[in-house]
Amino acid sequence: MNNIDLKGIFLGGFLGLLGVVVIAVISVFIKILLFGSQPYDAPYTTEELIILFLACISSYFWSGFIISKISRKGKLLNPLIVSSIMLVLAFFPAREVPVWYILLSGFLAPPFFYYGARCHLKRLIRLSSKGAVKGTA
């Protein structure tokens, strides 16, 4: 419990959610430009699912990065806690999607949250070795 930072989880989760909204708007805009608009009840095509999957991966990476950046303690643990929540929530989609999409978006959440957090830590180590960051590790 000493390594969990609630401020990092909640504030980082909120900022991660803002990033997810931006990524979702961009991916929907790209989807509409490429395929046109369809009614809400229409099933996804494979190409649309691939665009959504790429947006999903980038939002996982962003969320892991920002949660690790905001956290004072648990810079790797906090993103993994949030990613385990995302893993469970991926199995309850809002619309009808294929099983392969649910499984991939669910089980790839922890690795991409981890890679985002690790990217922040590598950046932090690189900056601290140059002397740009003081008192942070």
Image: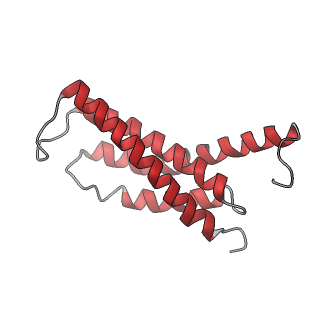
Residue at image point 26% right, 29% down = 47
Camera-nearest residue between 16 and 83: 16
Looking at the rendered image, the quarter that the N terminus falls into is: bottom right
Q: Considering only vertical position in the picture, is 54 above or below 62? A: above
Report whether residue 131 is seen. yes
Q: Considering only vertical position in the picture, is 60 above or below 80? A: above
Residue at image point 84% right, 41% down = 132
Count of labels in the image: 0
The answer to which image quadrant residue 125 occupies is top right
The answer to which image quadrant residue 116 occupies is top right
Report whether residue 114 is seen. no
Residue at image point 24% right, 56% down = 94
Query: Is residue 73 rendered to the left or right of residue 10?
Result: right
Report x, y in % for residue 9.
57, 64
Residue at image point 30% right, 59% down = 92
Report x, y in % for residue 35.
20, 27
Instruction: Name, please, the residue furthest toward the top.
Output: 34
Report x, y in % for residue 37.
16, 34
